[in-house]
Amino acid sequence: MGEAKSRPEGKHYTFFQNTECEFFPCHKTQDPSRFNCLFCYCPLYALGKRCGGNFRYTDRGNKDCTNCLIPHVPENYELVTKKYSEIMEVVRREDRRLP
């Protein structure tokens, strides 16, 4: 498992790395030792255009986040978790649509 040098002291929960994963790192990066796997499936994906990441939509209309490192940079832990209220609102709206 990797050690992120920028991880805040006493906040070990903000960084996780699985170097044994067959996809590691799943995005191109200059420094794989700092690649954070904690948000492996990005919670910001559900926000669509409001996620704040570097994404594009494919010809089939799928969101392609290949060029986004936001959830994989150790310093972005708080940026991601601060968006949870927006994610919960998306879930609430979707739940209201269901029978």
Image (cartoon, rainbow, N blue to C red):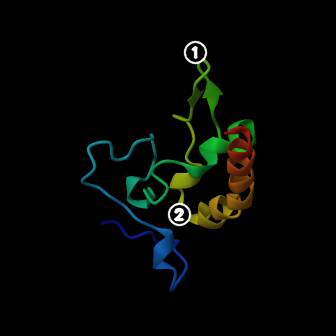
Q: In the rendered structure, are the residues bearing label 1 and label 2 in contact, judged by CB atoms less than 8 Å apart?
A: no
Residue 85 location, quadrant: bottom right
For residue 63, side relative to residue 90 (left or right): left
Q: Is residue 3 above or below residue 31?
A: below
Q: Is residue 3 above or below residue 54?
A: below
Q: Secondary structure at mark 1?
A: loop
Mark on residue 84? none
**Structural distance between the alpha carbons of marks 1 and 2:** 32 Å
Q: Residues within 10 Å of mark 1 (few under 14, many from 20)?
A: few
What's the residue at 70%, 58% (across, down)? 83
Residue 1 position within the rendered picture, expressed as x and y whole percent measured from the top left: 30, 66
Query: Residue under circle 1?
Result: 60
Residue 2 position within the rendered picture, expressed as x and y whole percent measured from the top left: 34, 66
For residue 62, side relative to residue 89 (left or right): left
What's the residue at 45%, 51% (across, down)? 40
Query: Residue under circle 2?
Result: 74
Residue 13 position within the rendered picture, expressed as x and y whole percent measured from the top left: 47, 74
The single residue placed furthest to the top in the displayed view is: 59
Q: Is residue 16 above or below residue 28?
A: below
What's the residue at 37%, 46% (across, down)? 25
For residue 21, side relative to residue 86 (left or right): left
What's the residue at 57%, 15% (across, down)? 60
Callout 2 amino acid: Pro
The single residue placed furthest to the bottom in the displayed view is: 10
Callout 1 amino acid: Arg
Residue 64 location, quadrant: top right
Residue 3 location, quadrant: bottom left
- Closest to the observer: 41 or 17? 41
Mark 1 or mark 2, which has the lower sequence index? 1
Q: Residues within 10 Å of mark 2 (few under 14, many from 20)?
A: many
Residue 48 position within the rendered picture, expressed as x and y whole percent measured from the top left: 69, 37
- Closest to the observer: 73 or 94? 94
